[in-house]
Image: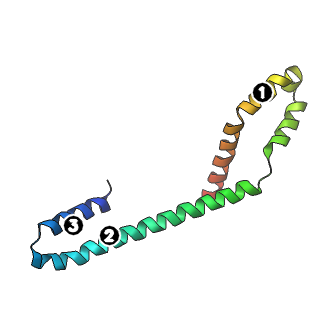
């Protein structure tokens, strides 16, 4: 729980314990706190959506690495010794390779 959540809980507790006369003055600060939290969550959501769209666009525009990697595999000594096993292993690790590419794109976005 972060500091703003603790503050909201404290304000709500004070509001519940307050007399009806005091609730009117406490209501404004309580409402302001919730509005700030909504604003922060909205900013966070927009940042997340923009980050996702940027990554998606980069990945969409990037060429498929499979043909290049497959051609390298065909010309390598490993593929000459055991091409079926190499291709099988490559296909098995295709998701991990895409994850590495995604992490590289994320790294370059934050750099």
Quadrant in which residue 70 is drawn: top right
**In what element is the residue under mark 2?**
helix
Q: Earlier in the sequence, mark 1 or mark 3?
A: 3
Position in image of residue 29 (x %, y %): 25, 75
Residue 111 shows in this picture: no
Which mark is drawn over residue 11? 3
Which residue is denoted by mark 2 in the rendering? 34
Pointer 1 with pointer 3, Cβ within 8 A? no
Tag shown at residue 17:
none
The residue nearer to you, when weighing 50 against 108, is 50
Neighbourhood count class around disc 2 (C-alpha, 10 Å): few under 14, some 14–19, many 20 upward: some
Residue placed at 46% from the left, 68% from the top?
42
Label 3, label 2: how many angstroms apart (C-alpha)?
10 Å
**Residue 41 image point, x, y percent:** 43, 65
Q: Residue 13, relative to residue 90: is it above or below?
A: below
Is 55 situated above or below 80?
A: below
| The image quarter in which residue 25 lies | bottom left
SS at circle 1? helix
User: Which of the two discs, 3 and 2, labels the residue nearer the N terminus?
Assistant: 3
Q: Is residue 35 left or right of residue 49?
A: left
Name the residue nearer the viewer: 53 or 2. Answer: 53
At x 65%, y 61%, the residue is 54
* Res 98 quadrant in image: top right
Quarter of the picture holding the C terminus: bottom right
- Residue placed at 85% from the left, 32% from the top? 73
Q: Is residue 98 left or right of residue 78?
A: left
Judging by the rendered image, the residue that carries numbered circle 1 is 88
């Amino acid at each position: 729980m972060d500091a703003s959540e603790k503050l909201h809980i404290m304000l709500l507790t004070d509001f519940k314990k307050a007399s009806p006369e005091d609730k009117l003055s406490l209501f404004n600060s309580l409402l302001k706190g919730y509005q700030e939290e909504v604003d922060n969550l909205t900013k966070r959501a927009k940042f997340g959506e923009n980050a996702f769209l940027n990554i998606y666009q980069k990945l969409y525009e990037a060429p498929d690495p499979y043909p290049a990697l497959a051609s390298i595999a065909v010309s390598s000594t490993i593929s000459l010794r055991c091409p079926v096993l190499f291709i099988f292993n490559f296909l098995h690790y295709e998701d991990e390779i895409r994850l590495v590419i995604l992490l590289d794109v994320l790294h370059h976005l934050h750099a």
